[in-house]
Image (cartoon, rainbow, N blue to C red):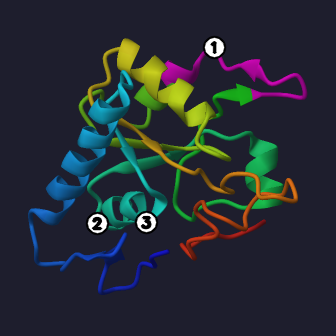
């Protein structure tokens, strides 16, 4: 497990703030993961890597969970929200691409965060199909995978990594 501080430790790799190539290295690492996994969008980043890019203003971090998840489970401070699905029936947000486009241009590095890293994959695919060239999925999501007790938030994900988050 790795934690972010002002010294910027990212998945066992220390990134110095003055290192101009650090964010490029993280993006290339994410692109390589995507290529190795055969996904059809720009890349795959772990939460600590996404936080480092977001903190350095190298990327837009968009939360694609429902408004209810953000309110009751928590959210990353300073991030915009564009739900991939919404409502009790989890209906597809038909305006998703347009809502993202209102936040960031198609060439911007966009990091997509959901609960466990599944909805954000679908969101990254949709953005890529719509012409966005740098849509990245944040692996593990905000709450992470289910543990042996069928609970989230204990084995991986944004909160488990100790990254900044808040609850309303």
Query: Whole-percent x and y of residue 70?
Result: 73, 52
Labels 2, 3: front one: 3
Could you tell me if the residues under marks 1 and 2 are in contact, i.e. CB atoms within 8 Å? no
The magenta stretch is: 86-98
Pointer 2 or 3: first along the chain: 3
Pointer 1 or 2: first along the chain: 2
Q: Secondary structure at mark 2?
A: loop
Query: Is-magenta flag for residue 95?
Result: yes
Pointer 2: what residue?
56
User: Which quadrant is the C terminus positioned in?
Assistant: bottom right
Q: Secondary structure at mark 3?
A: helix
Q: Kindly report the distance in space between the C-alpha atoms of the residues bearing marks 3 and 1.
A: 30 Å
Estimate how packed mark 2 is, as few (under 14), some (14 to 19) or many (20 or more) residues with alpha carbons within 10 Å: few
Query: Whole-percent x and y of residue 28?
Result: 19, 47
Front residue of 11/138: it is: 11
Question: In the rendered image of this protein, does residue 154 appear above or below residue 117?
Answer: below
Labels 3, 1: front one: 3
Query: Is-magenta flag for residue 140?
Result: no
Pointer 3: what residue?
48
Front residue of 38/135: it is: 38
Estimate how packed mark 1 is, as few (under 14), some (14 to 19) or many (20 or more) residues with alpha carbons within 10 Å: few
Which residue shows up at 43% across the image and 37% down it? 103
Query: Whole-percent x and y of residue 97?
Result: 49, 20
Pointer 1: what residue?
94
Question: In the rendered image of this protein, does residue 59 appear above or below residue 120?
Answer: below
Going by the image, does 147 lie left or right of 158? right
Q: Kindly report the distance in space between the C-alpha atoms of the residues bearing marks 1 and 2.
A: 31 Å
Query: Whole-percent x and y of residue 138?
Result: 48, 47
Going by the image, does 69 lie left or right of 128? right
Going by the image, does 95 lie left or right of 97? right
Going by the image, does 59 lie left or right of 17? right
């Amino acid at each position: 497990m790795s934690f972010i501080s002002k010294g910027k430790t990212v998945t066992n790799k220390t990134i110095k703030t003055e290192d101009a190539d650090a964010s490029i290295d993280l993006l290339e690492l994410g692109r390589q993961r995507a290529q190795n996994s055969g996904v059809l969008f720009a890349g795959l980043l772990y939460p600590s890597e996404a936080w480092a890019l977001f903190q350095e203003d190298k990327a837009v971090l968009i939360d694609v969970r429902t408004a209810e998840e953000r309110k009751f489970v928590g959210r990353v401070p300073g991030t915009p929200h564009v739900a991939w699905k919404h409502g009790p029936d989890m209906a597809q947000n038909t305006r998703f691409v347009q809502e993202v486009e209102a936040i960031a241009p198609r060439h911007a590095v966009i990091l997509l965060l959901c609960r466990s890293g599944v909805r954000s994959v679908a969101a990254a695919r949709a953005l890529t199909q719509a012409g966005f060239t740098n849509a990245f999925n944040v692996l593990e999501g905000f709450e992470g995978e289910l543990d042996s007790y069928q609970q989230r938030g204990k084995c991986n994900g944004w909160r488990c990594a100790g990254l900044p988050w808040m609850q309303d």
